[in-house]
Image (cartoon, grey):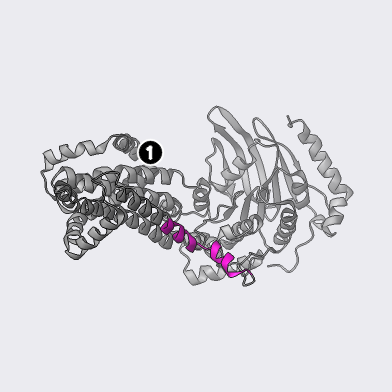
């Protein structure tokens, strides 16, 4: 891990940046209904990019196609320059409903990605323990998911995604099923994680505040069919306390700006 | 970070006792006691000359255990029953799981088993006798014919109801199809599969008793038929009740096996 990454607002946008994920002409039909229409997007390496839009705009569909869990009707996704044909080891998914195996302990759940790869038990348990500790669940290794709160379950889901050491973390509204306090804590954790891990985060959310608070880049999707309507790079100071950031003019202006753009979709 | 509440020692003993599973056994015994009591009264009145009181039936039961007739009868009955249930379980779970996984298998097999489950299969037993005679084959088939459809259909539904999110999770971590089935589908479906097996076993018991009453009187069926014909009603009832209890205990035992083997997380809370 690098000792210190430059703070986000200090970083000048480089002219050439490697795009770890590229989306080209992506469309998705569900029967006659077009969920996504000709999406072209670049996801620069090491950034936290949010997909934001009204419900039913296809943001989860887009994420699942990047994950290789859904087949596009047209167009392609490239990850590290290679066309996506299915899930791959360079991507890990964090599920909205956590998707934890109820019959398995936290330890086995977190190690599950490695278990599927055939990593020997002692090795994968060691890795899993490390990430369980990293997400703040040390001591809960032998618990079962039903014994944990919603927030803790999502931490397990996050640890499982981290344990396979993927370059891209795909998060499908990961905080929508947890309460507001936990959610804010999670956002802090995510920012921390983003600083210490050299990973790209693609993050689906329906919360404007959340997107502006955590993202380097926000992709605004419109609805019916889902298309990219705007890409915003929030210019927000990251060196203040969470409270200062949430009161910062630029933060509030960006939230307001996005809300103005999204209003038209609210019916 | 929130702490998980663990039962601590400050809670009074009787509350902890009441919160554990142990007391369900007490209620069950109480329920059985009430039933036996009602039976005793009904037998003492008596409401029917063919209904001996519970105490007399119980004594008859002890007598039949002592003279070995009951044990001998069970040895005879259990053979086709165990074979039939084993065949139905292996075949039923395989067919059912396959039907849940593959649309081809579903289209091929679902109509047959749906009809089999809806139809009064006991009516087929004379036909089975006609084709396969009065031997072991017929009795095993009678068990299978009753047990198989319920096992197949439950397994099929179980696999169909597997949490799609868990399947997607397995895919997202590049799980192979085989890993998906072995590590996600089967464990997630196991409660319903076992429910199907339990229903299948009780259906198997119906099958074997029907077979022994309808095909040739052997084992339990023979005991029931014989004691009825010579008006030993206490012995007849003892046999009937013993097979009911035996069936219930077997089915209950399977539930224990399931919890131990497949759902470690439910062991403490069930």
Q: Which residue is mark 1?
A: B103
The N terminus of chain A, quarter of image: bottom right
Which residues fall within the magenta stretch? Answer: B11-30
Q: Is residue A12 above or below residue A253?
A: below
Give whichever of A247, B270 is nearer the camera. Answer: B270
Q: Nearer the viewer, residue B165 or A24?
A: B165
Q: Position of residue B39 (x, y in %)?
A: 34, 51
Q: Is residue B122 magenta?
A: no
Count neighbours of disc 1 (C-alpha within 10 A) and say few if under 14, some if 14 to 19, many if 20 or more.
Answer: few
Which secondary structure, mark 1?
helix
Above or below A85: residue A117: below
In which quadrant will I find the C terminus of chain A? top right
Q: Is residue B42 visible?
A: yes
Seen at 54% across and 38% down, the residue is A72
Q: Is residue A97 left or right of residue B209?
A: right
Question: Is B269 on the left-hand or right-hand side of B91?
Answer: right
Give the x, y percent position of residue A218: 73, 45
**Residue at horizontal 31 percent and vertical 48 percent from the top:** B45
- Residue B86 placement (x, y as % from top left): 26, 54
Left or right relative to A256: residue B205: left
Residue furthest out toward the right: A249
| Image location of residue A242, percent across then percent down | 82, 57
Q: Considering depth in this image, is B132 or A265 the residue closer to the camera?
A: B132
The residue drawn where x is 36% and y is 54% is B36
Q: Is residue A166 visible?
A: no
How many discs mark residues in the rendered view? 1
């Amino acid at each position: 891990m690098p000792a210190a990454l430059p703070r986000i607002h200090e970083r000048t946008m480089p002219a050439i940046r490697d795009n770890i994920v590229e989306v080209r002409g992506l469309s998705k039909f569900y029967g006659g209904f077009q969920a996504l229409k000709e999406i072209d997007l670049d996801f620069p390496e090491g950034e936290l990019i949010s997909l934001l839009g009204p419900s039913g705009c296809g943001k989860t569909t887009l994420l699942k196609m990047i994950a290789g869990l859904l087949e596009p009707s047209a167009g392609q996704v490239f990850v590290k320059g290679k066309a996506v044909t299915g899930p791959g080891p360079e991507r890990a998914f964090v599920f909205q409903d956590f998707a934890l195996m109820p019959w398995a302990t936290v330890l086995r759940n977190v190690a599950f990605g490695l278990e599927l790869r055939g990593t020997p038990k002692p090795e994968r348990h060691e890795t899993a323990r490390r990430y369980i500790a990293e997400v703040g669940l040390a001591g809960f290794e032998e618990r079962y998911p039903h014994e944990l709160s919603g927030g803790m379950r999502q931490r397990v889901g996050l640890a499982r995604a981290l344990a396979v050491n993927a370059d891209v973390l795909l998060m499908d509204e990961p905080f929508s099923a947890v309460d507001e306090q936990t959610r804010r804590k999670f956002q802090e954790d995510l920012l921390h994680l983003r600083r210490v891990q050299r990973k790209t985060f693609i993050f689906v959310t329906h919360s404007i505040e959340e997107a502006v608070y955590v993202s380097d880049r926000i992709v605004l999707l419109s609805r019916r069919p889902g298309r990219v309507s705007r890409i915003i790079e929030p210019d927000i100071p990251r060196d203040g306390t969470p409270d200062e950031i949430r009161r910062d003019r630029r933060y509030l202006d960006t939230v307001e700006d996005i809300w103005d753009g999204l209003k038209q979709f609210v019916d | 970070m929130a702490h998980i509440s663990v039962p601590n020692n400050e809670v009074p003993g009787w509350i902890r006792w009441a919160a554990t599973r142990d007391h369900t056994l007490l209620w069950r015994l109480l329920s059985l006691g009430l039933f036996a009591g009602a039976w005793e009264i009904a037998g003492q009145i008596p409401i029917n000359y063919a209904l001996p009181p519970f105490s007399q039936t119980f004594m008859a039961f002890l007598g039949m255990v002592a003279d070995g007739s009951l044990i001998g009868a069970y040895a005879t009955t259990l053979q086709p029953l165990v074979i039939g249930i084993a065949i139905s379980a292996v075949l039923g779970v395989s067919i059912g799981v396959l039907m849940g996984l593959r649309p081809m298998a579903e289209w091929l097999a679902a109509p047959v088993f749906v009809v089999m489950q809806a139809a009064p299969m006991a009516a087929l037993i004379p036909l089975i006798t006609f084709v396969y005679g009065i031997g072991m084959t017929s009795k095993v088939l009678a068990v299978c014919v009753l047990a198989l459809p319920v096992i197949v259909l439950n397994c099929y539904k179980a696999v169909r109801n597997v949490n799609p999110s868990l399947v997607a999770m397995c895919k997202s971590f590049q799980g192979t199809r085989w890993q998906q089935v072995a590590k996600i589908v089967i464990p997630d479906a196991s409660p319903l599969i076992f429910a199907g097996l339990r229903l299948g076993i009780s259906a198997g018991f119906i099958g074997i008793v029907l077979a022994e009453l309808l095909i040739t009187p052997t084992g339990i069926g023979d005991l029931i038929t014989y004691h009825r014909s010579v008006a030993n009603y206490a012995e007849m009832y003892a046999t009937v009740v013993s097979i009911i209890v035996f069936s219930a205990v077997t089915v209950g035992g399977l539930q224990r096996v399931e919890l131990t083997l497949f759902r470690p997380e439910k062991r403490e809370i069930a």
